[in-house]
Amino acid sequence: MTERVAILGTGNMGEAVLAGAIGAGWSPGDVTATVRATEHGTARAASLRERHGVATTTDNAAAVTGAELAVVAVKPKDVPAVLDEIAPVLTAGAVVVSVAAGVTTAAMERSLRPGTPVVRTMPNTPAQIGAGITAVAPGAAADETHLALVERFLAGTGDVVRVAEKDLDAVTALSGGGPAYVFTVIDALAEAGVHAGLKRDVASRLARQTVLGAARLAVETGEHPAILRERVTSPAGTTAAGLRVLEERAVRAAFLAAVEAARARSLELGA
């Protein structure tokens, strides 16, 4: 893998993508990461160099000069300013990859030279350990070659799925924010275990492994979650009693509402 990559903004998501790419074999020498010109940014740059071996800079324009991939991983409100910085120096044919929630490819294309290929993506934080899932959608000038390059870059972060851009707000709400929902479930299960009399470290271990094992079972069997749930649930048994309470407390409806609220917010960010 010899393409040069600039990752503009290395917060949690930017570093997750960076770590996944390097873990998949992308050479650290071909990657430049940018940080803010602040005291915190200086410390962040040192940490990135130590952990990943990549070059760092505070200059977005310098980072993208000569790069075949420019990954825009800043906050959505900062995307226009970053694109204004890089547009004059972006290499012809370079692919601009967005991981900014809610920012459309059309909005990005307006800030770039006509014909610049843009690919909008939505990864999630498990990408940092190669267990994420990223949805990708092409802009007007992005063709199969550009998509294949982006997918190859993201392969080390986990699974990659192509979707229509109109579906990316829903993806953001489901898999983008999904890890936070699952962490909440793990925390709640562990706390419930403590209330039931378990030591906290034991309850936490049980909760984490239970969620991991259930997810792996669902992925590896490919069976519908409802079928897997039925296999755990004996008639009038302990699990049935617990599920009845979850239904009474409208936990399923709460997840539906949470995803819808996140989708609505993603749409607001792109307005």
Image (cartoon, rainbow, N blue to C red):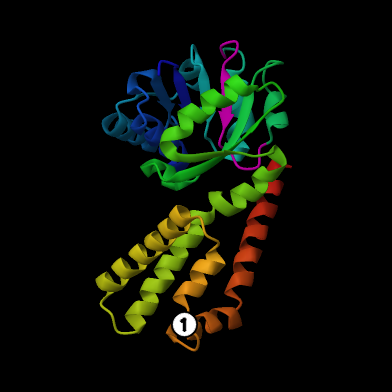
Q: Residue at x 37, y 75 (%)?
A: 191
Left or right of 197 in this view: 87: right
Q: Residue at x 45, y 46 (%)?
A: 125
* 177 vs 127: above or below: below
Q: Is residue 224 magenta?
A: no
The location of residue 140, given as percent across then percent down, is: 72, 25
Name the residue nearer the viewer: 155 or 264.
155
Name the residue nearer the viewer: 156 or 82.
156
- Identify residue for label 1: 234
Q: Residue at x 52, y 23 (%)?
A: 149
Secondary element under disc 1, as helix, strand or loop, is loop
The location of residue 198, given as percent across then percent down, is: 28, 80
Magenta stretch in the rendered image: 90-103
Q: Quadrant of residue 118?
A: top right
* 243 vs 51: above or below: below
* 223 vs 79: above or below: below
Q: At label 1, which amino acid type do we have?
A: Ser
Q: Residue at x 58, y 26 (%)?
A: 147
The location of residue 83, given as percent across then percent down, is: 61, 24
Quadrant including the C terminus: top right
* 240 vs 255: above or below: below
The location of residue 251, given as percent across then percent down, is: 58, 73
Q: Is residue 93 visible?
A: yes
Q: Is residue 91 magenta?
A: yes
Q: Is residue 8 visible?
A: no
Counting other residues with Cα less than 10 Å from the Cα at mark 1, is it few (<14), some (14-19), or many (20 or more)? few
